[in-house]
Amino acid sequence: MKKVILTGDRPTGKLHLGHYVGSLRQRVELQNSGEYDEIFIMIADAQALTDNAENPEKIRQNIVEVALDYLSCGLDPEKSVIHIQSQIPELFELTVYYMNLVTVSRLQRNPTVKSEIQLRNFEASIPVGFLAYPISQAADITAFKATAVPCGEDQQPMLEQTREIVRKFNSIYGETLIEPEILLPDNKACLRLPGTDGKAKMSKSLNNCIYLSDTADEVRKKVMGMYTDPNHLRVSDPGQVEGNPVFTYLDAFCRDEQFERYLPEYQNLDEMKAHYRRGGLGDVKVKKFLNSVLQEELEPIRNRRKEFEKDIPYVYEVLKKGTEAAREVAAGTLADVKKAMKINYFDDLELINEHIRKFSK
Ligand code: ATP
Ligand code: MG
């Protein structure tokens, strides 16, 4: 069986460190590992419209931003098919057929959708499209016959939903769709990176992000202003590492050799954590180290972005070519699906002949 990846992002803003550690960094590694036969990277604008219907301009402006973030992180259009969801109508046809396989109460039980509904104050009136977006996401994943979906932990319920749809479809209409696997980051800190404010998730909607395209100065200011342990008032106080986002970011980003470079009094993060727990290590020192670590990771990304920004027609060409290539694959799957459901009437000579016989009697 072919090994295929499908993953993507909603163009609701520029990409941030949460996207990077949760999915983007791993995508680039998987892309360069050569282990996958096909890699599809989707800019999910139609999904973004499910909670931004009144603001298509926001989505329209952010597609190119996300594409620039992709290219500057090392996604390579020669190896990965970068495409725009809304320009592939086959995905929405699949969605309609899958809708018949899912109940409203099943969608309402999805924990990620539940918390997103709360966050957006949709409780009183949920847009149908928003409630149903896990179904549309199942269409996205299955359209490319994806075997693996690298993403953050919040996507786990979406993958479960997709697998249910695949099983149901195949059991009714015969083996047609592929059940995908989720590929979570190995590093626990990356499953759900917290915000700079200490909230559980760094998220565009919560305004607690460090963006991949932030300037060096913006990154420094955001790091120095980060939430830490609120009980760690004096340097001499013992501090808490668990739930302290400064340490979670270090867990996600720092490497042992960076201590030698920036803070040689520690050999590794465990030693630094132990000192913080004991007391005697101030937040400012930890934050300065984190800033150095992040700058090292972000500077090459930022520099590559500046280069791609000089050639926007190239970026649009990448998107157009990728979308055309992706559409062909999705059309193939849709044809398989319609055949399995026997709703491919005009290609079905058996049906036509049967009706000729039936009505000639
Ligand atoms: P929005 O607020 O518009 O939903 P978002 O910041 O949640 O935006 P998405 O586009 O919904 O971002 O998510 C894209 C991918 O990034 C998904 O795979 C998701 O799991 C991952 N991701 C997003 N935020 C984080 C985070 N804080 N930690 C780890 N992974 C994340
Ligand atoms: Mg999200």
Image (cartoon, rainbow, N blue to C red):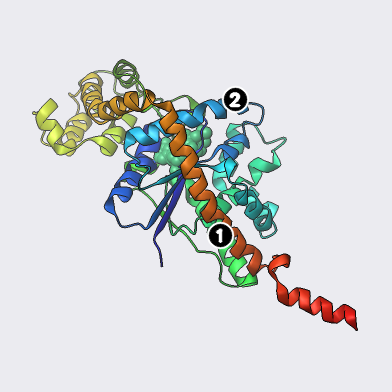
- Along the line of sight, which residue is nearer the eye, 246 or 76? 76
- Along the line of sight, which residue is nearer the eye, 75 or 25? 75
Q: Residue furthest right?
A: 361
Q: Residue 196: percent from the left, percent from the top?
A: 38, 26
Q: Residue 346: percent from the left, percent from the top?
A: 72, 66
Instruction: Name the quarter where the C terminus is drawn.
Output: bottom right
Residue matched to label 1: 332
Whether the residue carrying mark 2 lies under 8 Å from ligand 1 is answered with: no
Q: State whether residue 199 is above or below residue 327.
A: above
Residue appearing at x 71%, y 74% in the figure: 349
Residue appearing at x 47%, y 30% in the figure: 64
Q: In the image, what residue type sits under mark 2?
A: Glu
Direction from residue 60 to residue 360 in the image, left or right: right
Direction from residue 57 to residue 64 in the image, left or right: left
Q: In the image, what residue type sits under mark 1?
A: Gly
- Along the line of sight, which residue is nearer the eye, 175 or 201? 175
Direction from residue 231 to residue 360 in the image, left or right: right
Residue appearing at x 15%, y 32% in the figure: 258
Label 2 or label 1, whichever comes before in sequence order: 2
Q: Residues within 10 Å of mark 2 (few under 14, many from 20)?
A: few
- Marks 2 and 1, Cα distance to the nearest angstrom? 32 Å
Residue matched to label 2: 57
